[in-house]
Image: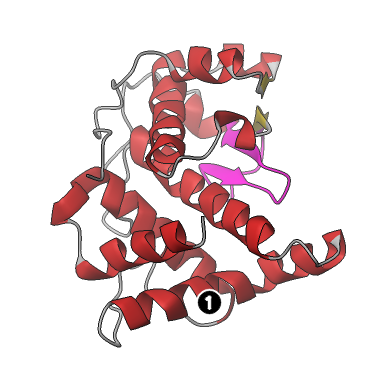
Amino acid sequence: MGGRGSSSGMSGGSGISSFKGAGVRIESDINGLNKALVNKTLNGVRDTLNEFGIPLNTLNGVGVTDSKKAMASVNGFGDLSLSRTEYSSKNSEFKKANHVADSTAYGIGTHEAGHLVSDYAMHKNNKGLSVLEKANMRKSGKWDRQVLKTAKKMNGGSLSAVSKYGSSSKGKAAHEMVAEGVSEYMRKGKNASATSRAIVKALKSYL
């Protein structure tokens, strides 16, 4: 059974508490953000890691960024950065956006967790590579293209766009297609698109 969370982001209590309890570093700057939005996003991360059976401390830390390039991002070290501008909003939810699978605060968490899951699988299946080689594999999108290739085989030889943001399996864009597939699956579960279900199935096959 998939998609155990909900876009309300209220499943299982406080995301902040969950990660603190798992020993994940939470930067003090987080205290100045909208706690409701932060918790919804971290709930999304937590529920996704639980769905894949991955330890919560796979997330290395949670901090704040002043960059306006993205609402949130995860780097290769497993650090989640939340946009100070976006997460300082006084609203209880983000404005709906149609270019992603789930634009809620919870959905941002499931998307970023999709990257964490893919990175975790990459490290598990490429233990013979050096740190630099794995970093290059992540940056180039090579690993995510491999995941999508596996998903394509599982889905009868074809994949469709998950969203406008997750629409290409080529180059570095594969990184976002995998994360969007995870995000849609976490929102819709068995009602997610065949492509998203195949992406999740492919990722789980590497775990």
Of residue 203 and residue 191, the one placed in the foreground of this image is 203
For the point 39% across and 17% down, the residue is: 36
Counting from the top left corner in percent of width and height, residue 37 is at 41, 24
Residue with the most extreme bottom position:
157
Residue 52 magenta: no
For the point 46% across and 28% down, the residue is: 42
Residue 68 magenta: yes
Counting from the top left corner in percent of width and height, residue 129 is at 81, 67
Write the start and end of the magenta stretch as one range: 65-83
Q: Quadrant of the N terminus?
A: top left
Q: Which residue is mark 1?
A: 145
Counting from the top left corner in percent of width and height, residue 102 is at 30, 47
Instruction: Please tell me whether residue 151 is drawn above or below residue 130 in the rendered image.
Output: below
Q: Quadrant of residue 66?
A: top right
Of residue 22 and residue 27, the one placed in the foreground of this image is 22
Of residue 91 and residue 191, the one placed in the foreground of this image is 191
Asked if residue 89 can be seen in this view, the reply is: no
